[in-house]
Amino acid sequence: MKIKRADKILLIYTGGTIGMGKNPYTGTLEPLDFKHLENAMPEMALVKTGIDVYQFTSPIDSSDMDHRIWAQLVRIISTRYNDYDGFVILHGTDTMAYTASALSFMLENLTKPVILTGSQLSMGELRTDGRENVLTSIEIASAHHENGTPIVPEVCIYFNGKLLRGNRSTKHNAEGFNAFESYNYPHLGEAGVNINYHEKEILKPDFTKNMIPHVAMDPHVIIFSLFPGLQEDIFLHLLESKDLRAIVMRSFGSGNAPQNQWLTRILNEAALRGIVIVNISQCEQGSVEMNRYKTGYQLQETGVLGGYDCTVEAAVTKLMFLEASFNDYHLVRTYMARSLAGEISI
């Protein structure tokens, strides 16, 4: 495959470990501006693709990420969409998979690369992993076919030699450089001496369509994990909020739950109130199959919707997106059961 290099990439710096430095008084890592990161990476000057930088006014720790910042990222990309061939977002690792998932839904008909990356060690550290992650992400975002179309026209995470679909990714390691994995979908590529792309796994958008940006997300969603010994009064208390719109319920194995009558009753009452309940597995790998066991089938009978092999990050951001898009319980359920951006296998 012959690869052309794009003319211009926008690098968006949100913050995260990659740009942090140690506070001399407390010894803790704190976000610094992009100049600090740029000084630590003189190799940027050797990149042949043109790079412009957009820096958040105040770099953030990714633990502070929320739907309003996702909307800000969508606005940054959409208002500059025609000026750049691709986008690289420097982001903290803790919520990177949530942001990648959210952007995959909010950037409808995306036809350009949006690559999220960061590091486990800050750029000021001697053994930082950030340098390779950033430089390779820029190379991936600028990679185009001979006909001018990008090789990876979707939202991805690049980290430690692996190119992953953003809404299939999860952070699975807090200490190792191998921080992210895609358990239920193949890698889109690997970087070694060469970057090898698995083109049959990469989304093929309609390049004749315009990208449609969405900035509205409804945050009135909760994630709840079932566990042995769950008590009725506590679970009921969680569901009493009048503003609650949807629940991501993390069940056992292939979608199973305790056979408590009170649990099925409460879930059924919530569904009748118009609360969308999506069942995903607590396992990192595998899919929900509620018809497989009686304990899963009873959930389906209460109105709980199977989430297939969706990650928790993709499930919650997809619900936030759909709840903001449709004021209709049945439409939200209909679109949750569809793959909008390659996030589930059907």
Image (cartoon, helix red, strand yellow):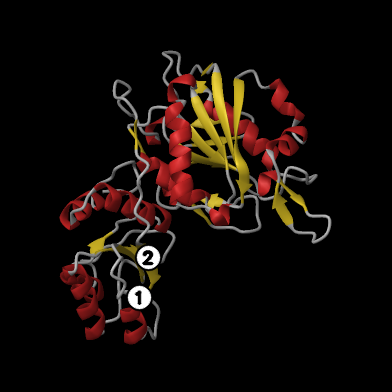
CA separation in Å, label 2 and label 1: 9 Å
On the image, numbered disc 2 is attached to which residue? 222
Q: Which of 249 and 235 is in front in this view?
A: 235
Q: Is residue 35 left or right of residue 247?
A: right
* Residue at the image position 48 percent from the left and 33 percent from the top: 76
Give the amino acid type for the residue marked by disc 2 in the picture. Ile
Mark with earlier residue (2, 1): 2
Give the residue at x 28% y 69%.
242
* 339 with respect to 52 (left or right): left
Q: Nearer the viewer, residue 209 or 292?
A: 209
- The answer to whether one can see residue 187 in this image is no
**Rendered image: mark on residue 285:** none
Vertical position of residue 107 compared to residue 319: above or below: above
Q: What residue type is labelled 1?
A: Leu
Label 2–label 1 contact, CB within 8 A: yes
- Find the residue positioned furthest to the top: 147
Circle 1: element type = helix
Q: In this view, does 211 lie above or below 325?
A: above
Q: Mark 1 points at which residue?
A: 238
